[in-house]
Amino acid sequence: MSALNERPLADDGLCFACGRHNPQGLGMPVRLEEEQARCLFSLAPHFQGWAGIAHGGIVCTILDEIMAHAVIRYIGQGVTTSMETTFRQPVPLGQEIKALGWVVLHRGRLAESAGEIRLAADDSLLAQAKARWLIKLDAQGQPIPRFGQPSAG
């Protein structure tokens, strides 16, 4: 994990989950409000697992991403060290879903978060997760805020 302390993580817009410049990605339009990361969107057919429903790995990616936005915004940069997901109902393709993520605990370099995916139409719970994070610290031992600039080359 020594690379975790070398420099800030850079956002080049190509993140699979939220990258603005990734045409193959999920295109999650995340916004931050009321101490939560929130996202409202629908999944395209190419994210299918079984017929008409999202692949479980895509569901996990959405949950990891929404929790990451909460951790980065309200604590600072960090990486997921573990994540536990519970699938409640199939996540449908082509219907609006909402993803929510929030910080549960922050103590030094460690953080815990929670997230969920709900069907926008009726607010039914589709999947939920909890995760642990290792927070990046600067030379003074403080969390590194948000993202640095992309590295050249």
Image (tube, rainbow, N blue to C red):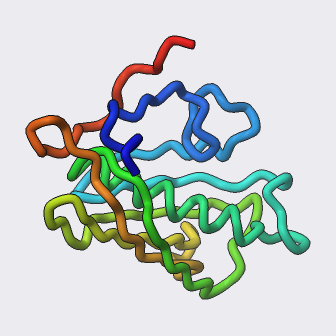
Q: How many marks?
A: 0
- Which part of the image, by quadrant, shows the C terminus? top right
Seen as rendered, the residue at the extreme top is 152
Image position of 130 with respect to 46: above or below:
below
Q: Is residue 141 above or below residue 130?
A: above
Image height of 137 relative to 87, above or below: above
Residue 75 at x, y = what percent?
Answer: 21, 51
The furthest residue to the right:
51
**Front one among 2 and 97:** 2
> Can you name the residue that lies furthest to the left here?
140
Q: Position of residue 19 (x, y in %)?
A: 57, 35
User: Farthest residue toward the front?
Assistant: 2
The answer to which quarter of the image holds residue 134 is bottom left
Percent of width and height locating residue 79? 41, 54
Taking the spot 59% from the left edge, 52% from the top edge, the residue there is 41
Depth order, front residue of 90/122: 90
Q: Measuring 9% from the left and 38% from the top, which residue is drawn there? A: 140
Instruction: In this rendered view, identify the residue nearer to me: 41 or 152.
Output: 152
Residue shown at the point (46%, 30%) measured from the top left: 11
Between 44 and 137, the residue placed more toward the observer is 137
In the drawing, does residue 96 fall left or right of residue 39? right
Give the residue displayed 30% in from the left and 70% down from the top: 112
Classify residue 116 as left or right of residue 133.
right
User: Residue 9, located in which quarter of the rendered image?
Assistant: top left
Percent position of residue 133, x then y: 35, 63
